[in-house]
Amino acid sequence: MAPPPRLVNWLKATYARPQINPEWLAACHDYITEELGVSPEDFESLKTHVEEQLLQSGLADSTVPNTGFPDPNSHGIQIKNTLCEVVALTEIGHSAFTLKNVRQARVDKEDLAGLAGDLEDGEDYSIPKYPRSMLRFELSDGTKTMRAIEYRRIPDLELGVTPLGTKIYLKEVSVRRGIIYLEPRGIQIKGYQTEELEESQDRHFVRGLRLRMRLPEEDPEAEQNPNVGLRQPERRQELPPIVPQPTITVAVNNNPPLPPLPPVQTNSTSAPVVDLDPDDLDVDLDYEDSYSIGDDVGADEAEQRAEIMGQDVIDIDEDPQVDIQPPVRPTRRVQAKVEDIIDISD
């Protein structure tokens, strides 16, 4: 059954932006009249139930997209008669480290309060409050999300108390550089909450604190199952160090073996031994050599001197082809007779 026109007009006048989704309104009207048993003729009861369903649901399901907020980067404008919901909330007047410590203290106190029956009487179970200076919000119209700050203190909004999904009706607020400035006189807090957003509030709050402290994000699965992934380190048996062994290189000869040498004939009759007598030689051995190394010079020193003498020789012939002359044999001295001497003194 279609909702009555009177109800549709009332919603348009009360919540001008964003526009209510007609399909959602028709389904909501059927639920109220059929499941809850509210008479379609009872306008006041019908109006109350429809507004309650609107404030309890997410605006993404109950409104027409892109009919609420302006451009998120807008500057110098005003937003009027717009319904929105809180999707994030934190304190920016205090450090993230302080907020993290307060949150941990709150968690510990909540655990102690749950065990109050097992503790002694007189124990303080009060939950500590977060410090209050200036709140920062993220507001959504169901499609777009804009940042907002508490320009002037709003007593009805408090970190750790105000649930996510709380609806705020913006009567007239200013926007500067994409940030909505909230004041008590320019807004109306409708309240309520969205279960889906509230269930993830603490996780998003911790994530925001870690980002402010420049810490890596935590794994959601590890938070839900803290024992998963925690294993006892395996004990490894350390082996003694290996002593390096010397490397032995074996030379491999790939060349074919040489044929064996012919045996040397040692027959004494094949080569008679010649006994030479110096007197039989027609050579005078009494000549003086042109180079004498002396009797006291050893063979090694003589060889060194020979090498030095060979290095001191300067070859002035540029022709690379050098005629090799046979060694000059020593000249035989002839004994001259007295009568053969010519006297030239005259």
Image: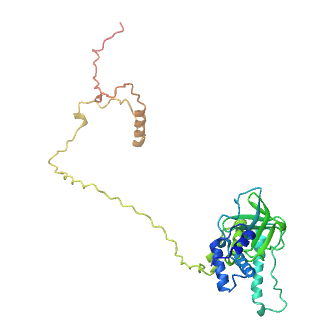
Do we see residue 95 in this rendering? no
Q: From the viewer's perspective, is residue 209 above or below residue 78?
A: below
- Residue shown at 66% from the left, 78% from the top: 28
Which of the two residues, 22 or 195, is positioned nearer the viewer here?
A: 22
Which of the two residues, 88 or 171, is positioned nearer the viewer here?
A: 171
Q: From the viewer's perspective, is residue 206 above or below residue 270?
A: below
Q: From the viewer's perspective, is residue 11 above or below residue 321?
A: below
Residue 48 position, x and y percent, is 74, 79
> Quarter holding the N terminus?
bottom right
Residue 143 position, x and y percent, is 66, 66
- Residue shown at 39% from the left, 42% from the top: 299
Residue 25 position, x and y percent, is 66, 75
Please identify the quarter of the rendering in which residue 224 is found.
bottom right
Question: Which residue appears farthest toward the left when viewing the image?
Answer: 269
Residue 316 position, x and y percent, is 39, 25
Q: Is residue 224 left or right of residue 148?
A: left
Which of the two residues, 260 or 69, is positioned nearer the viewer here?
A: 69
Please identify the quarter of the rendering in which residue 172 is found.
bottom right
How is the rendered protein coloured? rainbow
